[in-house]
Every structure is written in structure tokens, then in C-alpha cells.
Amino acid sequence: MANLYELQGVMLQIEQTLEDNGGELTDELAELLTDTEISIKQKADGYRAVMAKFDHKVDAVDKEIKRLQDIKKVAKNSKERMKEYILGVMGAYGIKKIEGELCTMTRTTTKSLEVNEEVLIEPHMAKIVELQKALPDYLTVEVKVSKTAIKNKFKDTDILPAGCAYMENDSLRIR
């Protein structure tokens, strides 16, 4: 059986022959036309069947990806729970470091800056609104809080602006 490209060529030959014959459809051309149309329909059905197989394959792969993502999520969560448990035990007994034969576990405390942007921006809201009103409609004001700038400005003091606080977090380092 011919492929679609070849069948297209046959259809073009039939059209050309019809033009050359002045539009006269001979029995021979009619049979060739019918056979070609049947072959094209069969090819279309075959292509559709192959596309359906691809659709099923895509669905199966999507399900497998989701299954693997679920397994990954469970593994990550299990690891985090184990780390939290070890960290809790170390904290409860005041242990800073555990040296095993294969690894060393160290409990470290880090300090991070937490910012409540609404509280921090509120005293400056009148100026922000005033600036927005002074600008044309096609320009907008977007206010961003820089934690780095806050840390740098107040690094020598423990006094922070309203809406900011340092939080201590314990973490477990495993080597």
C-alpha cells in the first residue's frame, strides 16, 4: 500500500489526466480515483489509530510522572521529619554536635530578618499615594522592601524599624 505522499501524487496525476482529456472521466480513471480515495481513507484511519496510541502513551507517562513526583515528595518529607526529630533531640539535651563514624551532625542557629511589609510601609503611605497622584496614569509606583538594606542600616544595633524582627532558626548540618 502506498504512503500518503504517494497517494497525493496519484491524485495529482488523475487531475492532470482529467485536464488533458478535457474533463472526460474514463472507466480506468474512475476506478483509479475510487481506489485512491479508499486508500486515503484507510491511511487516515491508520494514522488516527497511531495517534490514539500516542495519546495513550502520553497519558501513561503523565500518570507515571505524577506517581514518581508523589514518591519524591514522600521521600523529601520523610527526610525533613527525620532532620527535625534529630534537631529536636539535640536541642532537648543541649547537644551541639554528634560525631559518628560516617558523618558529623551539627546543630546551628541562624538569624533571619522577618519583615511585615504592611507595617513597615504604612508610615510612608501618604508620600507613596502623593507620588502616585503626581504621575501620569500610565506610570505606577511599586514599593519594594529590601531586607539587605535594612540589615545593613541597622547592623550595629538590635533596634529595628516597626514591622521587622530577627528570628532565630535551628538547622541541622550533616557532613
Image (tube, rainbow, N blue to C red):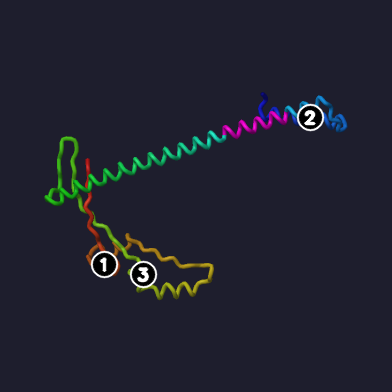
User: Going 30% across and 43% down the picture, which residue do you hit?
Assistant: 76
Q: Which of the two labelled residues, at mark 1 and mark 2, occupies the earlier sequence position?
A: 2
Q: Quadrant of residue 73?
A: top left
User: Going 24% across and 46% down the picture, which residue do you hit?
Assistant: 81
Q: Which of the two labelled residues, at mark 3 and mark 1, occupies the earlier sequence position?
A: 3
Identify the secondary structure beneath mark 3: helix
Whole-number angstrom distance, CA of label 2 to CA of label 3: 78 Å
**Foreground residue among 6 and 50:** 50
**Contact between labelled residues 3 and 2, with CB atoms less than 8 Å apart:** no
Identify the secondary structure beneath mark 2: helix
Rendering coords of residue 98 (x, y %): 15, 43
Camera-near label (1 vs 2) is 2
Q: Is residue 173 above or below residue 157?
A: above
Camera-near label (3 vs 1) is 3
Q: Which of the two labelled residues, at mark 2 and mark 3, occupies the earlier sequence position?
A: 2
Per the image, the residue denoted by label 2 is 14
Per the image, the residue denoted by label 1 is 160
Give the residue type at disc 2: Ile
**Contact between labelled residues 2 and 1, with CB atoms less than 8 Å apart:** no
**Foreground residue among 83 and 64:** 64
Q: Which residues are magenta?
A: 36-50
User: Going 42% across and 37% down the picture, which residue do you hit?
Assistant: 64
**Foreground residue among 11 and 118:** 11
Q: Quadrant of residue 145?
A: bottom left
User: Going 35% across and 68% down the picture, which residue do you hit?
Assistant: 118
Per the image, the residue denoted by label 3 is 121
Q: Is residue 110 left or right of residue 47?
A: left
Q: Is residue 48 magenta?
A: yes
Q: Residues within 10 Å of mark 3 (few under 14, many from 20)?
A: some
Q: Is residue 93 magenta?
A: no
Rendering coords of residue 25 (x, y %): 84, 30
